[in-house]
Image (spheres, rainbow, N blue to C red):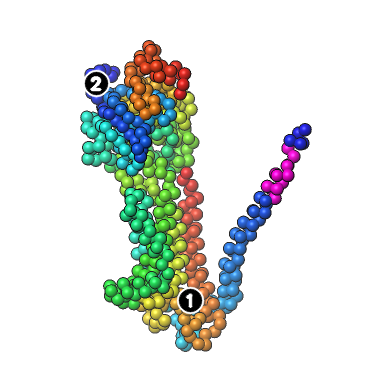
Amino acid sequence: MNNQMFAATQLNQKNQRTEKLVQLLFILMASLLILPVLVILATLVVKGGSILSIDFLFTDPTNGMTEGGIFPALLGTIWLVAVALIISVPLGIAAAIYLSEYAPDNWFTRLINLAIINLAGVPSIVHALFGLGAFVVFFGFGTSILSASLTLAIMTLPVVIVSTREALQAVPHSFREACWNMGATRWQTIRRVVLPNAVSGILTGIILEVSRTAGETAPIMFTGAVFFSPFLPQGIMDQTMAMSLHLFVVSTQVPGVPENLPYGVALVLIGMVLLMNSVSIAFRMHLRGKKKW
Amino acid sequence: MVTEASPIKLEIKDLAVSYGGQTAISGVNLSIREHEIFGIIGPANAGKTSFLKAINRMDMFDTNMQVEGNVLFNGQDVRKWRNVYALRSRIGVVFPLPVGLPMSVYDNVALSPQLRGIKEKAELDVIVERCLTRAALWDEVKDRLDTLGSLLSGGQQQRLTIARALSQEPELLILDEFSIAVDPVTTMRIEDVLKELKSEMTIILVTNLVQQARRLADRTAFFLDGECVEIAETEALFTRQASDSRTRDYVEGRFG
């Protein structure tokens, strides 16, 4: 009697089989995602690893860029990313705070949200042309780190805004109400309770932004990055070389480049992004470790 | 002792609250005297919480919520207070679900004094200890004031919420079903504290426990389906026959 009661029916068995099948399918799909990453990294290491050295990182390119190192490009990318971050992070976070904490739900807010979504969808080459027209020509910044970084900043703003807004929204509403009940203003509430608990989410957005900014080529091509420069940039009004553009140049524009050079450049570029990401991820995990609720 | 002659702390005139056209409560008229514990009983959905939200202007944060009628705090319409934050800081509120803010226990209680501009560490220490003691929580947390408030147990968080409300040094303390998450023994301890606090502030006690209102409240109002059915001296409401049959049924446990 008991055995019968607990025996699996045909329907049970069928459900279990389906469950296993579906799980397998999902695992397979998820694993597929790792594949391209591994293949890319492996290819770069195999083909470009041989050129890596301290000298490669810290010397100028020589002999029509077919020999020597990549120092000006490396430094240039750091400049571009840093200036872009300085512009877009405060702007993006401020906008996100307004949208999440202050904005009423009306046509104006909806318009801003629509604009953000559209800004995220604009192709990078269009951003490049916009940057050329607006910053290089109209504002007269010329082709400079400033123009290029402004272009990059505008391009990555949606990422910062959307991820920051989501991080803020993830902080339970009851915390805000508890503060308001005590007579705290909206800003006091944001500063004391909401922001400290949204930091890790905000950092995620910034990580994404760094990766994208470091890798973009089109937006900086017309606005501040140059093919080759004998000088290192001294300030934000200078032109600069950049890793992404340098990779494009040594891969396609210059004859007689040894095969391992472009791969080496790509490896350094990807290494830079991974390094910056892992620093922020480590920081984020440190913050997350102290679970708040 | 509260008497007929005590000054009126809070006066409600023709109060109605609705959410997007749906009425939560209407036609409420009552006045609460200084140093009184005013009990409000009634089943769920009677409009008790909506009533409370109208008092400290929480409708400002809920665009869906409409308030009509007048709420006079110290004789002044709460909607005409120029500084709504000052108004809220004088009204301490404890809602049914405990909210331990994700900061240390110490900061939870020190936050409101800090917002008032108290910076002196020694002064804050005194306030924190006094408020936690009154909320019957000090003994349990005095050795770990740096634990996150949001990681305390439910009952402890509720007492932390009460301590936080007390740290505002409010003129009016509103407790909305505070005992839901607290064990009976602790509830009794807090009830004793409330009896003492009466000399310093006015207290509105919303409760599901009919007997709690009977133990504490000077006067009690019965809310039902968005209507304030009856207000009476607590003893009269419970011992003699209440004037409305619905109140009698509720108090005697025939429904609700």
Q: Secondary structure at mark 2?
A: loop
Instruction: Say which mark, if any, is on residue A57.
Output: 1
Residue at horizontal 48 percent and vertical 76 percent from the top? A57
Residue at horizontal 47 percent and vertical 44 percent from the top? A293
Q: Nearest the camera: A61 or A95?
A: A95
Q: Is residue A16 left or right of residue A185?
A: right
Q: Secondary structure at mark 1?
A: helix
Q: Which residue in the protein does label 2 denote?
A: B6
Residue at horizontal 39 percent and vertical 19 percent from the top? B247
Q: Is residue B81 visible?
A: yes
Instruction: Please identify the quarter of the rendering in which residue B131 is found.
Output: top left
Q: Are marks 1 and 2 in contact (CB under 8 Å)?
A: no
Q: Amino acid at mark 2?
A: Ser
Circle 1 Cα neighbour tier, 10 Å, few/some/many (<14 / 14–19 / ≥20) = many
Q: Nearest the camera: B132 or A151?
A: A151
Q: Are marks 1 and 2 on the same chain?
A: no
Q: Amino acid at mark 1?
A: Leu
